[in-house]
Image (tube, rainbow, N blue to C red):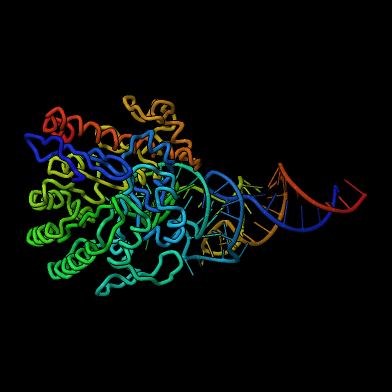
RNA sequence: GGUGGGCUUCCCGAGCGGUCAAAGGGGGCAGACUGUAAAUCUGCUGCGGUAGCUUCGGUGGUUCGAAUCCACCGCCCACCA
């Protein structure tokens, strides 16, 4: 048993847990910073340690294109290659089926991609994706799925779900390295019967964890929460539940209340590079805005991050304004700190049995 | 002193009689962003809510009509004395 639930919230479905991997423990609920191409953009591993990140993501599609599996294999695996000694979860490339849909074509056993970099053609299916993730030697391997777009008709959803089911079963059959574990991904768009069917089918495959995909792709927030209400209760309780690609701080708190243990999202790092800071209450602040030109206070007086302890909004705005990379770095540090700190507060609240109050206070 | 070139909206810069409130950059401002084709992208950028009003160094003039043509004045840059 690599996952252990330590405590459950008496009032919600929130759980406190520990996920064991060959590169260490992951304390859940967890937020996993996204490092698509072998780097959490603008952050060094030392800084991620300092921020207390338990685990980061990598991406099969992107790392396959560059530097390529041969290089990573030669380096001794992704951990060695990027100098990160804690757990890594690799996404399968299923999201790129969705996000790069203009550049690819479905086939029975996978997707014919055209590289967004040089136009070269290659094929990615469950077999290929898992083989790449095996070469990367990530701690958590994601099954290869088809991330359904939104809006989506029931006819499209059924085709997509059938494809995902087939691909995930094929993914599960692929060998893994010792210690690697694989998570399956529930799809089914915003249709209750499809979501439940998908969750039931996946449970049969006995994955080490269960992800919910195909959300936060444009559907209303309420629809996302509704999907969680359908799906999470029928996922195995003894396994971690991972909501892929989500989300805003308030969405994370709401999803934890619905029994989700793991999250990843590019929002904190991307918004940082685009000039916005997340505040402790979940709101965003456009630090690049003109009104902060002469504001010599930190982004957040209460924040314990390196940026807030040492720099003012006026200075960070100036750095952003003139295009100095330190501005992006400081905001990235701040946003990741805010996210990881939120997760600490969530875990503490569950441990203390006060998560329901925390949730009410936070989302108010 | 002479000859030639120039002065355009915050900046650079196009424009060479009507379709010009004026191309294109830059800068500025605002917005978007959810398993990252993203240090990216989109929109706005003379005033006014509209009708319209005020701009293209200055002042006059030519013309139905001028940023565009003419005269004078001012300033800048070249080269020649």
Q: Residue at x 43, y 39 (%)?
A: A329
Q: Work out whether A257 lies above or below A101.
A: above
User: Who is closer to the viewer here, A304 or B58?
Assistant: A304
Q: Is residue A104 above or below residue B12?
A: below
* Residue A88 spot, x, y in % from top left: 33, 48
Task: Name the residue located 26 percent from the left edge and 51 percent from the top edge.
Answer: A245
In the rendered image, residue B1, in percent from the top left (x then y), is placed at 85, 47
Residue B74 left/right relative to B38:
right
On-image quarter of the C terminus of chain A = top left
State the residue lying farthest toward the bottom. A107
Q: Position of residue A97 (x, y in %)?
A: 29, 64
Does the image show residue A289? no
Q: Nearer the viewer, residue A250 or A202?
A: A202
Residue A43 is drawn in which quadrant?
A: top left
Q: Residue extending furthest front?
A: A178
- Give residue A330's position: percent from left, percent from top: 42, 36
Relative vertical location of residue B41 with respect to residue A263 in this rendering, above or below: below
Seen in the picture, residue A337 relative to B58 is either above or below; the reply is above
**Circle count:** 0
Quarter occupied by residue A47: top left
Picture quarter with the N terminus of chain A: top left
Residue nearest the observer in this picture, B42 or A60? A60
| Left-right relation of B81 to A175 | right
Please indicate, yes or no, whether residue A176 appears anywhere in the rendered image.
yes
């Amino acid at each position: 048993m690599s996952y252990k639930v330590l405590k459950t919230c008496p009032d919600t479905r929130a759980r406190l847990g520990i996920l064991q991997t060959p590169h260490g423990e992951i304390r859940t609920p967890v937020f996993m910073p996204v490092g698509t191409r072998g780097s959490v953009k603008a952050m060094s591993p030392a800084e991620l340690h300092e921020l207390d990140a338990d685990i980061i993501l990598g991406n099969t599609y992107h790392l396959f294109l560059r530097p390529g599996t041969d290089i990573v294999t030669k380096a001794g695996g992704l951990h060695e290659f990027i100098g990160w000694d804690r757990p890594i979860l690799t996404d399968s490339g299923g999201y790129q089926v969705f996000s790069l849909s203009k550049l690819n074509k479905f086939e029975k056993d996978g997707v014919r991609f055209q590289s967004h970099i040089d136009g070269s053609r290659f094929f990615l299916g469950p077999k290929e994706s898992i083989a790449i993730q095996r070469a990367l030697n990530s701690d958590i391997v994601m099954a290869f799925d088809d991330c359904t777009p939104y809006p989506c008709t029931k006819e499209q959803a059924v085709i997509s779900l059938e494809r995902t089911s087939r691909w995930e079963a094929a993914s599960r059959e692929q060998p893994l390295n010792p210690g690697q574990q694989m998570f399956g991904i529930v799809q089914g768009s915003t249709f209750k019967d499809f979501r439940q069917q998908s969750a039931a089918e996946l449970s049969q495959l006995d994955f080490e964890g269960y992800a919910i995909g195909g959300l936060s792709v444009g559907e209303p927030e309420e629809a996302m929460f509704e999907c969680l209400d359908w799906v999470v209760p029928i996922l195995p309780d003894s396994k971690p539940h991972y909501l892929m690609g989500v989300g805003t701080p308030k969405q994370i708190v709401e999803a934890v209340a619905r029994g989700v243990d793991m999250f990843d999202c590019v929002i904190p790092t991307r918004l940082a590079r685009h000039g916005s800071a997340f505040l402790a209450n979940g709101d965003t602040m456009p630090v690049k805005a003109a009104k902060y030109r002469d504001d010599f206070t930190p982004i957040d007086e209460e924040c314990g991050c390196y940026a807030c302890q040492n720099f003012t909004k006026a200075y960070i705005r100036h750095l952003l304004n003139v295009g100095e990379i330190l501005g992006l770095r400081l905001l990235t540090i701040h946003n990741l700190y805010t996210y990881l700190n939120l997760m600490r507060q969530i875990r503490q609240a569950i441990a203390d049995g006060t998560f329901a109050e925390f949730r009410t206070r936070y989302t108010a």
